[in-house]
Image (spheres, grey):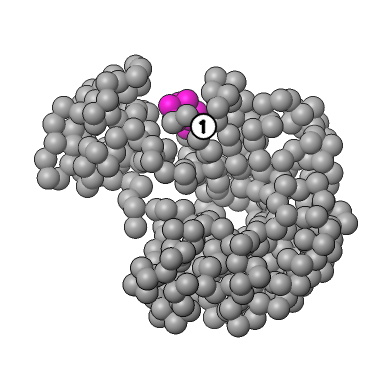
Amino acid sequence: MIPLALPAMAEAERPFVTRVRARREPDGTSDSFLVGETSEGATFAGPHGLLAIDGLSAEDLDGDVIVIQPRDDGSARAERVLRARSHHNTLLVTERCDQLCVMCSQPPKKTHHDRFELFERACRLAEPDTLIGVSGGEPTLYKEALCGMMERVLSARPDLEFHVLTNAQHFEAEDVPRLREPVYRRVSWGIPLYAAEPTLHDEIVGKAGAFARLEKSFAHLLHAGARIELRTVLLTSNIEALPALARRIAVRLRFVEVWSIMQLEKIGFAKNRWARLHVDHAAHFGPIAAALDGAALHGVRAQLFNFPLCTVPRPYRHLAVASISDWKRKYTPDCARCREQANCCGFFEWHPDDEALAGVTPL
């Protein structure tokens, strides 16, 4: 698994953001350049003094935008928030949430550490044409800080885009004029919808009234012309309801850009509920196929996330995208013999090895 957090030592006593350079000359006042390297790591010098990062070579780190969090004992943690050679960069802006989804991969915490200012500095240093993910917790619990950050970044860097994962429980009519501003054409919102039936959706997200509140937010987002990706995680409780959900999307939510049906991730709350929640889609693809067919019939673009290509029937294989982020993706030894590996999502690093091995048939 690609490490995102590394041990470090820094002269600075307060958190800061820097972009590290192994070979190239610094591009600006926020860059730190290589001054020495050993088998254990690399040392850089920049506007915040010396910075030593262990665990990776300077070449591996070259161009990465890093947030440094000093610690009381003199050590520090280096977070690679924007990796220069990756298409999978996501900012975790909060761990607080107002829902309690049964399969949540990032179980919420009660505390919040505000780092929007640091993240804004980091985004301004991103590689050209980068798509930056924003996740939580629930980012829109801090809607003003989130929107302000994105607006300032996109005004300064019109080549960037944001994709925000949100439960969409906090959009109001008063947000519509703001979200209509041209800058928000470069922001898309990933919103979960788990069923067409309110009781089932509310049961999955652990919040009474969530479905009704979501419908209000969809109305506001529609009026704002917002870009929306719908997300539906596949569970034993909702797989049979997927065709009905496809019909609802076709009738009520055709303005969405895409509908992503997602296989479950064995982490967070799902780890200890795996046997109860997980669906073997290879053995039970019928409802998924019916939902995909219904979406296509009505012009709704659908896609499959976290579905290895060889586990999907051939007629639907083109809908399975390489969705798993590079830092948490793995393949089985048999995958090396597959001609489609480069186009396949593979498996999450924490997916059970026995299940992965049993499910792979190289193409």
Query: Looking at the picture, how far across and down is residue 361, in whole percent?
Result: 46, 77
Q: Which residue is mark 1?
A: 129
Q: Secondary structure at mark 1?
A: loop
Q: Nearer the viewer, residue 257 or 166?
A: 257
Q: Residue furthest left?
A: 38
Q: Is residue 338 above or below residue 69?
A: below
Does 334 appear in magenta? Answer: no
Q: Quadrant of residue 319?
A: bottom right
Q: Position of residue 246 (x, y in %)?
A: 79, 63
Let me know if residue 250 appears in the view. yes
* In the image, residue 279 above or below residue 198: below
The foreground one among 348 and 144 is 348
**In the visual, does 204 lie left or right of 245?**
left
Residue 269 vertical placement versus 86 (above, below): below
* Residue type of the residue flagged with mark 1: Asp
- Residue 112 visible to the viewer: no
Instruction: Name the magenta segment's main secondary structure.
Output: helix
Name the residue rendered at 29%, 38% in the picture: 61
Return the residue nearer the eye: 280 or 361.
Answer: 361
Left or right of 314, for residue 214: right
Give the residues drawn in magenta, as a range: 117-126
User: Is 258 left, or right, of 317 in this rendering?
Assistant: right
> Image point 49% across, 62% down: which residue?
344
On whether residue 124 falls in the magenta region, the answer is yes
Query: Can you give x and y, in whole percent of width and height, for residue 94 in the image?
Result: 53, 44
Q: Position of residue 58 (x, y in %)?
A: 22, 37
Q: Quadrant of the N terminus?
A: bottom left
| Residue appearing at x 53%, y 38% in the figure | 131
Residue at horizontal 58 percent and vertical 37 percent from the top = 162
Q: Would you identify the image quadrant in which residue 212 lies?
A: bottom right
